[in-house]
């Protein structure tokens, strides 16, 4: 029964990050006026009691990870940081102009892309620009995603000083062959280094992201990755399933064949 249910729902589907999911958006039945009305109503219901949560997307990466399903822009030109932050703060002002009163922020999460693509100074400018127009809830939570290869101690210290206490590091898998296939080569040493730095600085929640079902990944690879992860004792774990959709993700996932990706019973193990 369990296997039959797994097989029944083991099909590609829309991403879960929006509701209704993207294929069911209907612009003809949802106007700007209706959006503003819904926006204000949602704000009034949440802000007065516990505050609002903000997700800020920082889309830039210096290289392409082929497993990634997020919106990203691949570039090594760091001069894009300033105009992007200007645009985010301009968007935040548009929201603030709609709020009937001053917002109270309970959560901020920086995702990507690679938030640590941005310099510590530019991340500081971003956060200062957001909180300058808001109050903070009594027990607010700030979190961000960091790449082990480019997260510096300065990043961790600056964000800690700004109120961040949660950090998530993308690990995925420690197998060299898997890392080469997904274009995400990072050593255990780099992951250990940023994990220890975060702990020394005082972060209270350190998370590692792992993925199963990656190309060329074996059960032994997953066990080895989990054992290495246990040795670093992160506070949280996220264990994601790799989605193989080369017809959507383009050339990135065309670097390996369908038969290189574990599936069905092998993946379930």
Image: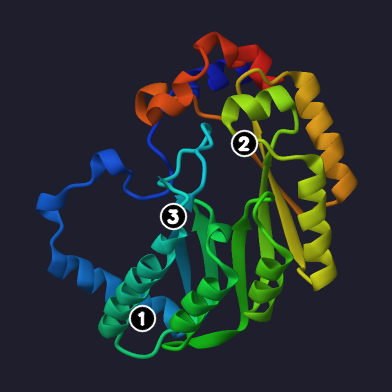
- Of residues 234 and 162, the one nearer the viewer is 162
Q: Would you identify the image quadrant in which residue 199 lies?
A: bottom right
Q: Position of residue 11 (x, y in %)?
A: 45, 22
Question: Residue 42: x, y in percent?
Answer: 35, 72
User: Would residue 34 be found to the left or right of residue 209 on screen?
Assistant: left
- Would you say 105 lies left or right of 214 here? left
| Vertical relation: 4 (above or below) 154 | above
Percent position (x, y) of residue 54?
A: 46, 69
On residue 148, which mark appears? none
- Image point 71% across, 73% down: which residue? 157
Spatial CA span between label 2 and label 1: 43 Å
Q: Would you place residue 156 above or below residue 74 in this image? A: below
Dot 3 or dot 1: first in sequence order is 1
Res. 31 visible in picture: yes
Callout 1: SS: helix
Residue placed under numbered mark 3 in the picture:
77
Q: Which mark is residue 44?
A: 1
Query: Which of pointers 3 and 2 lies earlier in the amino acid sequence?
Result: 3
User: Which residue lies under the disc numbered 2?
Assistant: 184
């Amino acid at each position: 029964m369990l296997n039959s249910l797994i097989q029944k729902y083991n099909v590609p589907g829309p991403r879960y990050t929006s509701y209704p999911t993207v294929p069911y958006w209907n612009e003809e039945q949802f106007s700007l006026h209706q959006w503003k009305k819904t926006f204000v109503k949602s704000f009034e219901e949440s802000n007065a009691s516990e505050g609002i949560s903000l997700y800020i997307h920082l889309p830039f990466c210096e290289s392409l990870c082929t497993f990634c399903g997020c919106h990203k822009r691949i570039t090594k030109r760091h001069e894009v940081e300033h105009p992007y932050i200007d645009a985010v703060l301009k968007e935040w002002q548009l929201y603030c102009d709609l709020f009937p009163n001053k917002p109270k922020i309970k959560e901020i999460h920086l995702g990507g892309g690679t938030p640590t693509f941005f310099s510590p100074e530019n991340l500081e400018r971003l956060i200062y620009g957001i909180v300058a127009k808001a109050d903070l809830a009594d027990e607010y939570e700030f979190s961000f995603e960091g790449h082990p290869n480019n997260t510096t101690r300065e990043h961790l210290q600056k964000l800690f000083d700004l109120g961040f206490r949660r950090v998530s590091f993308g690990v995925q898998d420690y197998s060299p062959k898997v890392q080469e296939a997904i274009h995400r080569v990072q050593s255990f040493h780099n992951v250990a280094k940023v994990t220890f730095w975060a702990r020394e600085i005082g972060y209270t929640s350190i998370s590692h992201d792992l993925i199963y079902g990656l190309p060329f990944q074996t059960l032994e690879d997953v066990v080895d990755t989990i054992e290495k992860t246990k040795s670093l004792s992160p506070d949280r774990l996220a264990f994601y399933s790799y989605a193989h959709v080369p017809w959507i993700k383009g050339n990135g996932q065309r670097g390996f064949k369908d038969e290189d990706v574990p599936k069905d019973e092998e993946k379930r193990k």
